[in-house]
Image (cartoon, rainbow, N blue to C red):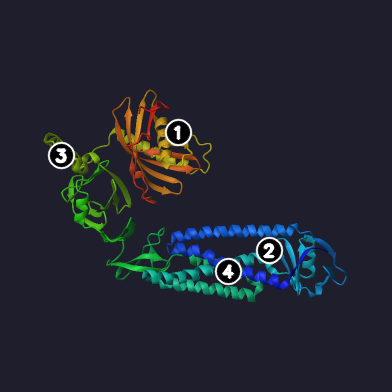
Amino acid sequence: MKLHVKKIIDRASWKTQQNNQKYYLIGALFLFSLPVVMITYHFYIMFFLLFFIIIIVLIASYIQNIKSFFDLKRLKSEVVDVDENQCFVYQDKVFDFHQLIKIHLLRRVIYLEFENDIVVLEYQKTLFNQLKDSYSQLINQKTTKIGRISFMLLMIDMLFGVIIIMKIVGGIIYCLSTSTTIIDISRLFGDIGTLAFIFICVFLANILKKYKIVFYTVSVIVAFWSLMSPMTHVTQLLVDQGAIAYREDVNGVQIYRDVAYVFGKDATLMYVDSIDDIGTFHDVVYVESQQQYQFYSLTTPHQTLQDLYEEYEGSSYSHQDINIMIDKNVIKINSKPYQAELIGDHMLYVKLQHPYIIQFKDFRCELYQLDRGHTVVLQEDYMNDVTSQDNDIENEEKKSQEENQDNETVTASTSQPEEKSEIEKRREKQDQQRYQAYQQAIQQDDMTSFQSTQDVVKVHDENTDIYRVIKSLDREITRINNEEGTILDVQILSMLIYHQNNDEYGIYINRRVDSSVEESQTFQEIIFMKKYGHDYIGTRLYDISYMPTDHPTNNGEYETRQTTDYLYRIDGHQVVENAW
């Protein structure tokens, strides 16, 4: 048997190096568990910092391992012969295979462990097979394929165990710093039981080595299930924020805030016989019981109902046939006064035929229908603002007459809805067709061969400004749907990215359209858009009720009426230089 010897290492120093690697591994497990703990307790900045550190550590470790591997590969090997007594000589030292302690295979390098030295050999498949045949009991099982799988499962077990330990330790610190308490003790004991189960499986695996991989696999499955399962006695409402949870018992509904892991702070107890519905709208938790609603604000209100009325006195907001205004300390919906309850800063509860929450925000207000979970966004009527009324008596009287006529029209429409016009019917049908076409289009993963239609268009835009991309998409939709001989001058007045889920966007857009064949019109519409690299697929709808209510962005409205950057002209099916 011939050996290709690379070098000799002192066994004591090699053992020290191996022990240090174990310590590094344990430290790495704790380091890897910390980001999970940071997310659990809402320390997002620390999470990103630790994640960045872990990436750097992994890259540095990988570079170091690659460097060591190539340094060893570059060493010239010396061929030595093993005599019939199973001995060989290297650097004036005699090595006897009868005194061999262990055989290791690490990164395609063979290590022969003797009493005082480690002989490093160049890997050869035939040589390693000979060693397995002759000294199979001396081969380190961690270097075999099954051994490596077992070791990987053990590392996952240890990682899960460390995560549980760190979550409990972090929970103690969290309780002391935020005055929270245990809100689900059964889940806490369940995780402690999972931790004990992991240790028992590892202990049995080291005793019954033949079934090591079975014990490790079972413990990994149980630990993963335990970590992923929700709390047993309390239910989280805002999973993405991890902040709110509730427990239902004979007394009613106990709301908890600042929830992290199994810890939380008692917020309020709502006395109800049963829960018909429970949910959240922005910073308010609502509970419905027998068609009655109770509310809890996550943020302490800093205003009274009178303060809200004074702040928004004279403000008017509209969307299609809905109008909301504050007039003389009364909220009016379609000119009818209603009693309102303050449930949070800038938030009112109003009961019409359906229960609603109204939130006033910036230059718009949101109307949220509780029993449907549906939101409508109303934009402020700048021209109808009471504070901007002209002092001229004739204009005041004229405006008053117009408002009375409008109110009569709205009242009539609410009490006895008019039949839809042909234009409304056509737009409704067009919206349905476009929405279905858009939903079908975005099911595709590859948009390379996609061709624009009148329903769904595709644009290529490498601009990093998302509002510029929206303009490009809106312009393409207008161009494709325009008629020959018609010139359109379009000004985008404002945009609001209301919904974003990964690369899918829902945008409110206000546009003024001056046509060569019709009178000027202002439209409030929505655009659906999905990003594929630098390609964008999208459509535009008249009916803004299509806007999804999930994944809101909380972005403010982007005003563009004061700039010429969002103007464009379409002549037939061509984009031409605009009139401005």
Say what amino acid the circle numbered 4 marks: Ile
Q: 8 or 237, which lies in front?
A: 8
* Crowd tier of the residue under label 4, counting other residues whose Cα lies within 10 Å: few below 14, some 14–19, many 20 or above: some
Residue matched to label 3: 404
Residue matched to label 1: 453
Say what amino acid the circle numbered 2 marks: Lys
Tag nearer the camera, 4 or 2: 4
Badge 4 or badge 2: first in the primary sequence: 4
Say what amino acid the circle numbered 3 marks: Asn
Residue matched to label 4: 26
* Crowd tier of the residue under label 2, counting other residues whose Cα lies within 10 Å: few below 14, some 14–19, many 20 or above: few
CA–CA distance between discs 2 and 3? 85 Å
Could you tell whether 53 is left or right of 75 in the image?
left
Instruction: Tell me the SS state at disc 4.
Output: helix
CA–CA distance between discs 2 and 1? 55 Å
Residue matched to label 2: 145
Which numbered circle lies on residue 269? none
